[in-house]
Amino acid sequence: MPKNDLVQSVTRALDLLEMVGRSENGLTLQEIARGLGVQPPTAHNMARTLVARGYLQKSRQPIRYQLGSALFGLVDRQAQRDIRARAGAEMQKLAADFPAATITLVEARSGDLQVMLRISPEMPGIIQHPPSQTMNGYISAAGLVFQAYWTASERADFRRRCPFEEFGANAWNNIEQFDAELSRTRANGFATPATNNFFRVSVPIFNHSNALIAAIGISMPGDNVAKIDEEIIINRLKTASRVITATEG
């Protein structure tokens, strides 16, 4: 498209965001006006609009403009879509390898551990998007993964919302025993909570900043799993986690 066919106000807004993104500590209004080649009132109106929409944030004393949370949210949502697409492909491979298994992708959403994707033996190869299925943060394999790899503040926030005494005491003798299990989870790189007649395992998925973003897990009847198969399943899950996180291209 020829440059003279572009919408000038839009290109200026994008130029403004790029300028601010290149700066280390944000830009003053005067710096924005000079960089765009516009008068300060025009720069002020553009910056004010972007602040109102969350694409810029304005600091005071001194007044400077930096990139806002709405812009980062767009990037995060796109990255999340890419991760879920790769997760779905890996889950289908796992389902083909372990047809008796239920496979889940779990994310932390609004204080809950929500199942975002699911494949079950009842619907072979079909990726389900459960609308409201959640995992117990103290009993499920995914719950152990999240509590093991969350930061201390994230874990504390979760435990305030979901107290151990109410949601976990029936499965563990005390919180110290539970925390010891979290230490084992971190040391092993996976969680396998003990359950009657079922084998459950979950591994963490990290982003490129090494922050926990999801857990992928398998659950299947224990009589379908021999000891050697447990190691195979765990290693396949770890491989799937690495593929899901991998940079495309």
Image (cartoon, rainbow, N blue to C red):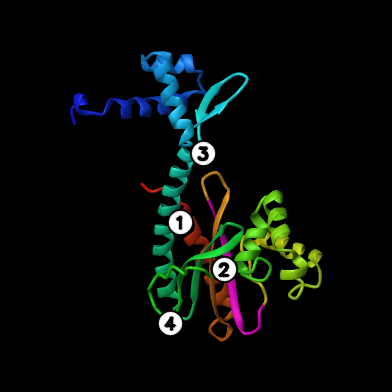
Along the viewing direction, whichever of 211 and 138 lies nearer the viewer: 138
Residue at the spot of label 3: 69
> Which callout, 4 or 3, points at the residue further toward the start of the chain?
3
Give the CA distance from mark 1 to mark 3: 25 Å
Q: Kindly state the secondary structure of the residue where label 1 is placed.
A: helix
Q: How far is disc 2 from disc 4 in space, using C-alphas?
A: 19 Å
Instruction: Give the number of the mark in front: 1 or 2.
Output: 2
Any mark on residue 134, and which? 2
How many residues crowd around disc 1 within 10 Å: few (fewer than 14), some, or many (20 or more)?
Answer: many
208 left or right of 123? right
Q: Which residues are magenta?
A: 195-206
Residue 171 at x, y percent in the picture: 73, 75
Q: Nearer the viewer, residue 35 or 8?
A: 8
- Amino acid carrying label 2: it is Thr
Work out how far the residue at label 1 is from the one at label 2, CA to CA, in angstroms: 21 Å
Report the quarter where the N terminus lies. top left
Q: Give me the disc on residue 122.
A: 4
**Closer to viewer: mark 1 or mark 3:** 3
Query: Disc 1 or 2, which lies upstream in sequence?
Result: 2
| Vertical side of 13 occupied by 40: above or below | above
Q: Choose the circle earlier in sequence order: 2 or 4.
A: 4
